[in-house]
Image (cartoon, rainbow, N blue to C red):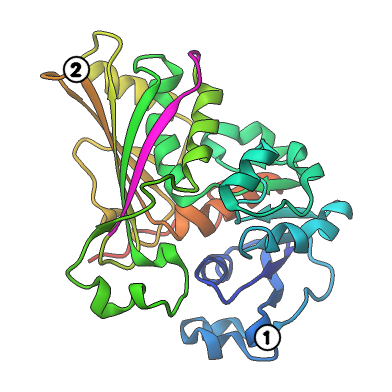
C-alpha cells in the first residue's frame, strides 16, 4: 500500500516537519509540495536537512495525491483546499479554518471572513485520543492547534469525570518555532535569548478552541479557560501547567488510575510519575501528562509536555492520516526522543 501525498506550503516549519516524518513512513510517497516564494527550487535548497527527499517545490499541487496536507495560514488554507474538498479528496488542514464550529466565533477570533463556511459542519476535530471514530470516517480533518493539544489532553479525563469545576487556568510556555518561520524583530536572537515574556493577554486565538472541545466532553455547563501563553528561549516544545479546583474528594492514586484508564488506548499519551520537561518530547509524537493534587488548596494541577511541531502539528496530522487510511495510528511515528 502506497499513499500519494501532496503538501501545501512545505516551506513553513509545519510543512517541512511533515516531510521529515513522512519521508520514513513505510506506506507514503510524497508526490507534490508547494511553496510560492520557493517555486522551482529543490526543497533541499530551502531546508538542507531534507536533502535526501529530492523534492521540487512547485506553485500548485501536481498529479493526483490521495491526501492533501495544508500547512497554509488560516483563511488562505480554506480558500486553497476548497476545490480538493469538493472533489472528495482527503484533506488534513493544519490551519485553524475548520477547528471552530461557530462561524461567527471563527471570524471574530481571526478577524477574517471564512472562505468556505459550508464545509465546517462536515469537518472533524483531529485529536485522535478524543475523536478517533470520527476521524476514521471523515475526509476533512481540522488538525488541532499546538496549545489546545496540551490543554485538551491534559484536562479531558478530569472534565469527563466531573472532578473539577468549570473554570480552568492554563499557563503555557512555548518555544519560538511556534511563531513560524519569520524575520520579525521580536523573534530575533538578541530579543529572545535570556528572555521570557507573556503575550495574548487580551484573548489568545487558541482559547476558544480549548473551550469548545472541553465543553463537548464536560457533563457540566460550558468550560471556561483562562489562558496565558509565554514565549521562552528554546526552539521546540510546550510546557503547560493547568490549575482547577477539585469538586470531589480524591487522592493521588485515584487521579493516576483515572488518567491511565481514560488513555488506555492512546499510544502517544504517557501518564508520568514525575513532572515532565519539554526535552522528553523533542522530535516525537508524545504528550506527557502529570496530574497531581495540591491537598492544601484542593487543587488539581496538570502538567503537560509536547513538541509543538510534532504532536502539536505535523505528527498529529500523520496520526490522523494513518487513521483515515486504515493504518495503525502509530505507523511512521514511533521514533525516540532526541536528547539532550
User: Magenta residues: mostly which secondary structure?
Assistant: strand
Check residue 173 for magenta coloring.
no
Which of the two residues, 187 or 214, is positioned nearer the viewer here? 187
Q: Quadrant of the C terminus?
A: bottom left
Q: Is residue 306 above or below residue 55?
A: above
Where residue 15 appears, as percent x and y from the top left, is 57, 69
Q: Is residue 57 above or below residue 205?
A: below
Q: Which residues are magenta?
A: 219-231
Q: Secondary structure at mark 1?
A: loop
Which of the two residues, 327 or 102, is positioned nearer the viewer here? 102
Q: Is residue 194 above or below residue 117?
A: below
User: Can residue 21 be seen?
Assistant: yes
Q: Secondary structure at mark 2?
A: loop
Where residue 295 appears, as percent x and y from the top left, is 13, 18
Mark 1 is surrounded, within 10 Å at the Cα level, by few (under 14), some (14 to 19) or many (20 or more) other residues, namely some
Q: Quadrant of the N terminus?
A: bottom right
Q: Classify residue 60 by image quadrant.
A: bottom right
- Provide the residue designation for mark 2: 298
Picture residue at 59% right of the left edge, 81% below the top: 53
Disc assigned to residue 56: 1
What is the distance, in whole Å, between disc 1 and disc 2 at their CAs?
Answer: 56 Å
Picture residue at 82% right of the left edge, 53% below the top: 85
Q: Are marks 1 and 2 in contact (CB under 8 Å)?
A: no
Does residue 206 appear left or right of residue 132 in this picture?
left
Q: Classify residue 3 by image quadrant.
A: bottom right
Check residue 227 for magenta coloring.
yes
Picture residue at 52% right of the left edge, 38% below the top: 208
User: Which residue lies most toward the right here?
Assistant: 87
Amino acid at each position: 500500500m502506497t499513499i500519494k501525498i501532496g503538501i501545501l506550503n512545505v516551506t513553513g516549519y509545519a510543512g517541512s516537519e511533515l516531510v521529515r516524518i513522512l519521508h520514513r513512513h513505510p506506506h507514503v510517497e510524497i508526490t507534490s509540495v508547494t511553496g510560492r516564494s520557493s517555486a522551482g527550487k529543490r526543497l533541499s535548497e530551502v531546508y538542507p536537512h531534507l536533502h535526501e527527499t529530492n523534492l521540487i517545490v512547485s506553485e500548485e499541487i501536481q498529479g493526483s495525491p490521495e491526501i492533501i496536507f495544508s500547512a497554509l495560514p488560516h483563511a488562505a488554507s480554506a480558500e486553497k483546499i476548497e476545490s480538493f474538498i469538493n472533489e472528495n479528496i482527503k484533506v488534513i488542514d493544519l490551519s485553524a479554518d475548520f477547528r471552530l464550529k461557530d462561524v461567527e466565533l471563527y471570524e471574530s477570533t481571526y478577524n477574517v471572513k471564512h472562505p468556505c463556511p459550508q464545509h465546517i459542519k462536515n469537518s472533524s476535530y483531529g485529536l485522535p485520543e478524543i475523536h478517533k471514530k470520527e476521524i476514521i470516517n471523515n475526509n476533512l480533518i481540522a488538525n488541532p492547534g499546538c496549545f489546545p493539544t496540551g490543554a485538551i489532553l491534559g484536562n479531558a479525563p478530569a472534565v469527563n469525570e466531573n472532578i473539577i469545576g468549570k473554570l480552568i487556568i492554563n499557563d503555557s510556555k512555548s518555544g519560538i518555532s511556534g511563531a513560524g518561520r519569520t524575520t520579525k524583530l521580536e523573534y530575533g536572537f538578541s530579543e529572545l535569548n535570556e528572555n521570557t515574556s507573556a503575550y495574548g493577554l487580551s484573548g489568545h486565538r487558541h482559547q476558544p478552541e480549548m473551550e469548545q472541545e472541553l465543553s463537548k466532553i464536560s457533563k457540566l455547563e460550558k468550560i471556561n479557560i483562562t489562558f496565558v501563553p509565554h514565549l521562552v528561549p528554546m526552539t521546540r516544545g510546550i510546557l503547560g501547567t493547568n490549575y482547577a479546583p477539585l469538586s470531589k474528594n480524591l487522592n493521588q492514586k485515584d487521579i493516576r488510575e483515572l488518567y491511565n484508564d481514560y488513555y488506555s488506548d492512546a499510544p502517544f499519551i504517557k501518564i508520568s510519575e514525575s513532572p515532565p520537561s519539554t526535552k522528553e518530547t523533542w522530535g516525537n509524537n508524545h504528550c506527557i501528562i502529570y496530574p497531581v493534587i495540591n491537598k492544601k488548596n484542593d487543587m488539581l494541577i496538570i502538567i503537560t509536555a509536547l513538541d509543538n511541531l510534532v504532536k502539536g502539528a505535523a505528527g498529529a496530522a500523520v496520526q490522523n492520516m494513518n487513521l483515515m487510511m486504515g493504518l495503525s495510528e502509530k505507523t511512521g511515528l514511533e521514533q525516540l526522543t532526541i536528547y539532550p
